[in-house]
Amino acid sequence: MSGNIHGLSWFPQFPDKFVSWGQEIHLYEVRRKDDHSQKSRLPYISVNYLANETRYQYARCVAASYHSDQPIIAVGLADGKIGICNFRDTYDSSWEYTPRQQRMCTCLAWNELDANILAIGHDRHRNDTCITIWDIERGVPKETANFFGVGEFANSICWDRNHRTVIAGMSQKMIKLFDLRQSNATCQSIQTKTVQGLSVSPNGNYLCSYVDSVITLWDPRNIKSPLRQIQSSKNHLQIAWCPTRTSLLSSLQRDSSYITLYDIRSVDNENSGEIYHVKRQISPFPARYQYSGKFAFVNSLSWHSRDFERALVLADALNILDFRLPATLHTAHSNRRKLPLLMQRPLFTPASPTSTTAVTPTQQQPTSSCSTNSGSSLDFNTPGGSPLNVDLLEPELFELDLVDETRQRALEDYGIKPVIEFAALHLTPYLRNVWTTLNNVYCDDRLTGLKATLGINLGHTSEALMASSRIESQVLQWPEGINNSNKLICYRSEQRDLALQLCGWAFEQELERFIDQLYANKEYSRAAMICVFHLKIFHACNILSSAADNMRDPSMYRITVIALSSFNADRCSSTWRNQRSSANMQINDPHLRAVFSFLTMEKDNFDAVLKEEGVSLSDRVAFACKYLSETKLADYITQQIQAAIDGGDLNGLLLTGESQDGINILQSYLDTSFDVQTVALVAINYFRQEHFADKRIQYWIASYLDHLNSWGLWEKRAELDIKIERIRASSRSSRTVFLSCNFCGKSVSNALLDEPRPRSTTTSTNRLSSCPSCRKPLPRCSLCLMHMGTMVNMSNGETPNTTSEVSGWQTKPFSKWFSWCQTCRHGGHTEHIMQWFKQNSECPVSSCNCRCFDMDGTKPNTLRDIS
């Protein structure tokens, strides 16, 4: 391969072959995954090089045909010649067409139903046509019925879904439809400048075109007026429909490294057929190249005709990538009120494996099968040998009603209420413990993890210096009656004491009160464990003995009390150590297992206690802070952070705090639980402003807010927005959103507030009907025809006594606010608009047929009176 590549295209009938063109034309075949016979010809996609076309160089445009017997392409050159190439050595002169007047070929389009028919578009010539219909089996076209558009030029061309009508963008000013079903082809035209990139959607409902930064959607069955226009920030380079999705439109923009996707949807209610779109942008480059500067821009894209949401991407006019969209998921309630995660199926109808109808090879359609043998995977198979295997469904999702749980928590102000009120929510003990731990670690408006508190792996930073206080070691004395020759060393420092407090443990002087609190909460075994860790063995016996009197099955506690009361380290440790491994399998309480592991330790080997996963991470880390040396403590903290990231354990935030490792833990938890609600709320409550630049946090919050919107929980959404703004209030800049004048562009509200002269207080209301800067009139309400303005009051320097007064100014009530439609831009006072749509469905402005409220799917008879 030499020179730059200008474009590429899959072959519709050959799912493993594609062609690229530029200075040369090359044919490639994609290898199977198990084929490693030789080195790939292209660096970023595993392919075999098949052939090239040497007759046609510097191709202006190329189109892959729908022939099923061999790969055939049509090549348009700058001099207007059209060549048909089958990548064979034999040369057929009948497969070349040259127009009467030499001029550039601008576009090509094969007919999908009749693979031999090709539509050709040329540049303008005053005495020649610009559109030619060529049946390559009948030789070069000569009949006048095959030529259209005298004195015009073709910008783009395509066929409708019936494959009998040619749709062409002509002369940069109109779209024409030529119906070829009659001998004298009829022509229908519509005036528009969006004539580039004409293409019909796979379902035949939409026709798209573009010019500069505007995409226009049409109904090809009634093309009198556009259905919708989509405005972008950059000019478009290419637009194309995804053939395996009903209405997914892709766009490449100039000097952009992203693919923009528009999911076209329809309201489809009884009163309207309005459409809207959902936009998203995706980078096709591998994650390891995202920020390396390896790739810059996307120049061309070709969708695979059968493989679900797969495309070839041309990057920087040289590199070809095989790209597949991330799995598109949809949620839906079943009769069992569960949350199935459904991957959107391809457009093709899957073939039934039990069908007995014979299908010929040429009629066989791509198949897709959904396999859920294990209940945790979806498998879409395609005939091209590239199965799409996505492990999406966790078994827990079939047991937990995640939708209802999430919605119920949202209704109960989950993440908005203080942590002390979380006990009343529908939370699992795990989540309740996580929020309690985060509340303990959160201090001084910061989620400080134990890693930073202890100064682990911080280098020579200021935080490390603050955490490098003097560490004192002390040899502990065993209680009387317990002989133990092993020396038990305890470490203390100012930072370790703070870490114990963050873990929920009390100081020595407050230990007895802490133990009594655990006993009152019926955490008997944990209280006994902490007593043993502090060498208060007889106190632990008393706790377990008292707890046994209040339990239905006190046998385990009784046996533990007997064992502890008669324990002698020097005489019993070896015997206990031999029996511990088998006994631990029969002891169900992890805290009692930790007690026996601690008493039978060998010198300073505390691994049995530190690896007891049944004990909470905070208790294990507190134990490590008490008995591990500096080096061992640092290693243990690092290991636990990595384990929390691998397992998605939110308790690991106790160690990481608000850091990159903390964000990784949240992401891992989301991957295993699909609980975007908890992840978003943790980020909102405990992460500071500088971490919100991470795209993952932005995505979590946006996803959860979308969930609230989809449930209609507008008030909960507003409360969460207010909470987010309060959290960021310290770093908030001056106001940048304001009402601006349509003529001069200056702020209307700020101009009023910034006037230095005092305003008269004799009138309670001041209506502003014109711009204070240019004195041009403000827009009028569509119903009362009064100028829209800002109604304010001034409070004579008195302290505002209501929440509606801010900085001496009283804002307007909501019923007086200005509301407008995002489609037709007409509007007025909110109370007037609401009253109008109680009885009407169309816009109040005469001659405007926009159904404004249908865009939100709101029925007029369900509107509330908010005035």
Image: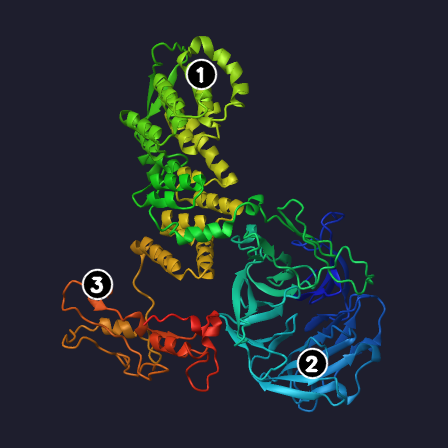
User: Marks 2 and 3: CB-CB under 8 Å?
Assistant: no
Q: Please name whichever residue, 634 or 200, is drawn nearer the observer in this view of the structure.
A: 200
Q: Position of residue 756 (x, y in %)?
A: 18, 72
SS type, badge 3: loop
Amino acid carrying mark 3 in the image: Thr
Q: Residues within 10 Å of mark 1 (few under 14, many from 20)?
A: few
Which is closer to the viewer, label 1 or label 3?
A: 3
Q: Which residue is mark 1?
A: 603
Q: Which residue is mark 3?
A: 802
Q: Position of residue 117 (x, y in %)?
A: 77, 77
**Residue 494 versus residue 104 in the image, above or below:** above
Q: Please name whichever residue, 590 or 767, is drawn nearer the observer in this view of the structure.
A: 590
Q: Which residue is mark 2?
A: 166
Q: Quadrant of the C terminus?
A: bottom left
* Picture quadrant of residue 709: bottom left
Residue reaching furthest top? 571
Q: Position of residue 521 (x, y in %)?
A: 35, 32
**Residue 35 versus residue 642 in the image, above or below:** below
